[in-house]
């Protein structure tokens, strides 16, 4: 990336001041941008420099444009440089603003003769990118947006004023283009976007083209930055994370308490507890399967032992279901309460004659159910009675 901090002082005009924040910025006065159907004030410009250890820490926030004298910032830098500090680190979270003031900021920062590094917040756009390009190393978060476009300006006055402004705009445009060109790894890609309007890039895309040096982890995005980025045409929705984080924290707290942990348990502790419970649940599932298998075997054995003695075969499944659903004890109690089956052949008694004498029932005296029972359960007796009636053995 370009390391030089020098600028052409002839670019500083007393008759005009222009802005390239976005097309909605139309004057030098207090800027309002539209977000979600309501006017919201632009993020106020804030620029500070202070000594932190062996380097200067500079923060550039909001829409670039001096609301107070640039001398305040210049004096801060001069004081730090006077203490022998040569290195500086710049934090930028800005949608852009005045090219004039961005150039002046670069000039002032050029007083640090050592290593100039920087990092971006959620958004580094327009004139703010010009400052970023003058850092030896500049990083951005993965969810940040970087935007480049030609400088814009607004001016009023005489024809001479307009001509002077036009020349200044062209000179500034050339200066900015040269800065982007010096950093770009693919000049044809720069040229393709340069005259096409706003060129929005993710941090990864900005790194690929050479405008930044490093992509870092995502950062939390505040509501104002998200709304104003959307209002100035950012094609990617920057999502405020404050409310989401609070909701997630509450969910994590609830989960921790439900697991029997402290409310401030870490994600790692919660994960470990869940893993432990999953392991226990798997063992319980295996145990329940084993118990079920044993119970079903006991039920089947009890029912099969009762078939033909206490229940008929057609009732077998009914009692199997009873045992599986209600348990072995309930099944056993139920079967114990059922009397054993008495077969028809067991109750056939000889008929009595009028004089009190008895005689054996004949084949033709038996009911169909009695004959069926004899045929299935006492074939020999059935054959004897059949032969006595018909004179020959039954063939079926």
Image (cartoon, rainbow, N blue to C red):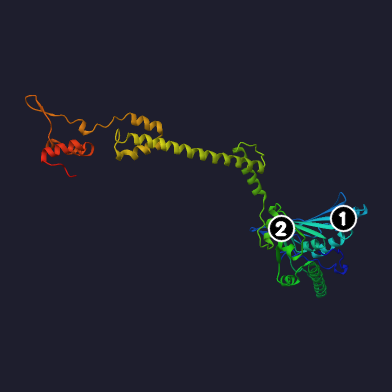
349 is higher (above) or lower (below) than 109: above
Identify which residue, 256 or 195, lies in the foreground: 256
Q: Residue at left 65%, top 38%?
A: 263
Residue 396 location, quadrant: top left
Identify the mark nearer the N-term, 2 or 1: 1
Residue 123 location, quadrant: bottom right
Which residue matches tag 2? 144
Which residue matches tag 1? 87
Residue 259 location, quadrant: top right
Q: Secondary structure at mark 2?
A: loop
Q: Residue furthest front?
A: 392
Image coordinates of residue 75 in percent, x first then y, are: 89, 55
Identify which residue, 169 or 218, lies in the foreground: 218
Image coordinates of residue 309 in percent, x first then y, are: 29, 33
Identify which residue, 335 or 148, lies in the foreground: 335
Residue 303 is at least partly visible in this image? yes
Residue 45 is at least partly visible in this image? no
Image coordinates of residue 73 in percent, x first then y, are: 86, 56
Q: Is residue 154 left or right of residue 262?
A: right
Image coordinates of residue 78 in percent, x first then y, are: 90, 55
Mark 2 → mark 1, Cα distance in angstroms: 25 Å
């Amino acid at each position: 990336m370009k390391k030089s901090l020098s600028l052409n002082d002839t670019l500083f005009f007393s008759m005009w001041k222009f802005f390239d924040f976005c097309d909605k910025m139309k004057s030098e006065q207090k800027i309002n941008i539209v977000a979600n159907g309501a006017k919201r004030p632009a993020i106020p410009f804030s620029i500070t420099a202070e000594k932190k250890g062996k380097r200067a820490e500079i923060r550039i926030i909001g829409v670039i444009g001096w609301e107070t004298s640039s001398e305040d910032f210049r004096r801060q830098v001069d004081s730090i440089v006077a203490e022998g500090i040569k290195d500086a680190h710049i934090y930028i979270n800005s949608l852009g603003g005045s090219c004039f003031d961005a150039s002046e900021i670069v000039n002032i920062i050029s007083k640090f003769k050592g290593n100039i590094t920087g990092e971006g917040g959620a958004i580094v756009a327009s004139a703010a990118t010009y400052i970023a390009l003058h850092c030896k190393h500049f990083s951005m978060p993965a969810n940040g947006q970087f935007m480049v476009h030609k400088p814009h300006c607004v001016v009023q006055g005489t024809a001479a004023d307009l001509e002077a402004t036009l020349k200044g705009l062209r000179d500034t445009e050339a200066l900015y283009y040269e800065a982007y060109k010096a950093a770009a790894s693919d000049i044809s890609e720069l040229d393709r976007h340069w005259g096409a309007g706003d060129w929005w890039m993710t941090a990864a895309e900005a790194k690929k083209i050479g405008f930044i040096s490093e992509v870092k982890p995502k950062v939390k995005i505040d509501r104002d930055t998200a709304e104003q980025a959307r209002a100035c045409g950012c094609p990617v929705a920057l999502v405020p994370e404050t409310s989401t984080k609070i909701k997630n924290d509450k969910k994590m707290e609830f989960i921790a308490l439900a697991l029997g942990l402290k409310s401030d348990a870490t994600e790692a502790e919660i994960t470990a507890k869940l893993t432990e419970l999953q392991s226990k649940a798997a063992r319980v599932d295996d145990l329940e399967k084993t118990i079920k298998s044993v119970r079903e075997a006991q039920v089947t054995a009890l029912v099969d032992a009762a078939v033909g003695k206490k229940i008929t075969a057609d009732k077998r499944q009914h009692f199997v279901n009873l045992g599986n659903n209600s348990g072995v004890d309930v099944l056993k109690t139920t079967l114990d309460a059922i009397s054993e089956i008495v077969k028809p052949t067991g109750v056939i008694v000889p008929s009595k004659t009028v004089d009190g004498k008895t005689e054996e029932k004949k084949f033709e005296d038996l009911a169909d159910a009695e004959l069926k029972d004899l045929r299935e359960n006492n074939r020999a007796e059935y054959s004897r009675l059949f032969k006595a009636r018909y004179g020959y053995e039954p063939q079926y």
